[in-house]
Image: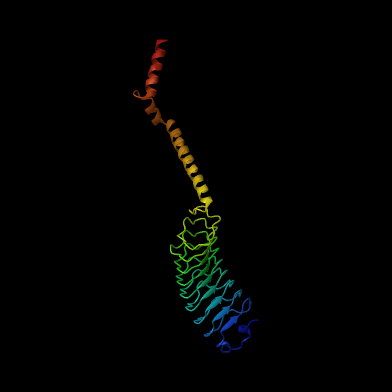
Amino acid sequence: MCIVCESKTPSDLSNLQTLDCDNCPLITALPDLPNLQTLDCSGCPRITTLPDLSHLQILDCSRCLRLTTTLPDLLNLQRLYCSNCPLITTLPDLPNLQILDCSRCLRLTTLPDLPNLQILYCYMCPLLTTVPTLPYLQTLYCNNCLLLTTLPDDLPRLQNLDCSGCPMLTTLPKLPNLRTFYYDQCPWLNHPLNLEYQENLNRLLLLQRWCRKNFKYFVFNRWIQSEEFAQFFYAPDQWGGFCSKKTLERMMMM
């Protein structure tokens, strides 16, 4: 049992600055904690919402399986860990956030503007399609985001990038400070280091040529069996008509 469950009155916690109630199976809601700065409520399966925590700087609510689709405005938040929260679809504006781990949020579709973000883990978010402009971002792990198509153009400080397993990603912006780069299973990512792209492009070109030739043959084969072709080919002024006339003349002379 955690300190919230043991407390008889909410006033007992009014001056609390740090609260650790992770993996508590009994807690269903948190009281108002106006001075709280650090909160770890990860792995609390019955929590559905969070109160207004205006002074909060660090929040770990990962593995809160019933946490609702939106979080409260947390303007002073600097670190947010909300991985494995299957009901979260969006995040509020977090102007001071520096670290965000929203990995494995299966319903997350978009990310807000995060002007001061430095580290982003958004891997295995299957509905995420874009990443916002993040001018101070240094580390981005967006691997296995199946619908991700592009990355923002302005990532001048990015040093670590893992975009492996993103089959719809086709291009990357200029990344002058990139140090580590993982791109496995990105079949259409046009990048000089991605040899798989050129191999797949060559296969596609061969397939296009084969389809084009066989389609023409199919159309031609259908045409030569039609009445239209017979009328054209055996017309008196065509080669077939001329040959037929000569054949009939030879037969008449026999």
- Viewer-closest of 44 and 18: 18
Image quarter where the N terminus lies is bottom right
The residue lying at 37 percent from left, 21 percent from top is: 242
Q: Residue at x 40, y 20 (%)?
A: 244
Furthest-left residue in view?
237
Q: Specify whether 156 is left or right of 181.
A: left
Q: Residue at x 40, y 10 (%)?
A: 253
Q: Residue 229 placed where, x, y %? A: 40, 30
How many numbered markers are drawn? Answer: 0
Residue 199 coordinates in the image, percent (x, y) = 52, 47
Q: Position of residue 249 (x, y in %)?
A: 38, 14
On screen, residue 232 above or below 179: above
Q: Using the image as rendered, state which of residue 22 and residue 25 is in the foreground.
A: 22
* Residue nearest the observer in this picture, 181 or 146: 181
The C terminus lies in quadrant: top left
Q: How is the image coloured?
A: rainbow
The image shows residue 161 at horizontal and vertical percentages of: 52, 62
Residue furthest top as drawn: 254
User: Residue 135 appears in which quarter of the rendering?
Assistant: bottom left
The answer to whether residue 142 is above or below residue 24 is above
